[in-house]
Image (cartoon, grey):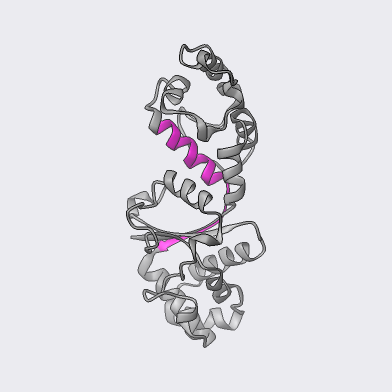
Amino acid sequence: MLLSLDVVDLLQLQEMWSWRPIVAAFSRLERREPQPAMGAVRFDLNELMPRLVRLRHSSGWQQKTTDPARVPIRDLSESDFSLLYPELDAAQARQALFDAAYHSFVIARCRGPVALMAAWLRALADARRVKADDYLDARALPQPGSPDWIPADITDEIRGLDSRYRAAEPGTPAAYVIADLFWPLLVKAEEADITAAVQNSGDRRQLMALVEVARVWNRSPSVVGLCYQIEAEDEAA
């Protein structure tokens, strides 16, 4: 099992997915890097336009007064996706677009085995001589924050499309918003703390990767930290 800490600009992600017209969203997203390989589904405005023309002239859409180019991605139905991407399953096309949009707004990420990352965090707490329970849960993983710390509609909508989130397990270590109080454990770590922690945990590179993610979170007030436990075979996702 792997632990993934993501620092994500959820506000921009929601704006692109839920509020911007699809043409505006594609125009913005196709310029963002990096994006994972998506096969036949990608943010390519030139490729999107003839697909929108086909959707606009479909029998189902002609009953509507709205131009599909002005509709956010969120509001497209399964049948709309089937017309936009007839070569793919509609649910797969939607998921591929969401995954690419999500990755476009991940500004920092650290991933590693759950047990090892927990050991590094506890070792750092010991090195800094702080009370681990102030930052970590009973498993030495980041403290979960209240879901109300960011607008619930963002949390629910993003998690609803995020394949790593287990809807049947809200609030568990499987997937959650990380508490703000967790990050100072890493942000305030000094060189001597890191050196001392490495003597106990044995991997300076991985501990520094955790510290750097925390520093990115700390200097970016509009972002949210998310914690996921994922299966090892999902590591490339």
Direction from residue 188 to residue 178 in the image, left or right: left
Q: Residue at x 40, y 21 (%)?
A: 87
The residue segment tinted magenta is 92-112
Percent coordinates x, y for residue 193 in the rendering: 56, 82
The quadrant in which the N terminus is found is bottom left
**Observer able to see residue 186:** yes
> In the image, is residue 134 above or below residue 81?
below
Percent coordinates x, y for residue 141 in the rendering: 42, 70
Q: Name the chief secondary structure element in magenta.
A: helix
Q: Residue at x 48, y 13 (%)?
A: 58
Percent coordinates x, y for residue 138 in the rendering: 37, 76
**Observer able to see residue 33:** no
Choose between 9 and 3: the one closer to the eye: 9
Q: Assess whether residue 131 is covered by the magenta stretch.
A: no
Q: For residue 94, what is the image quadrant? A: top left
Percent coordinates x, y for residue 216 in the rendering: 62, 62
The number of callouts visible is: 0
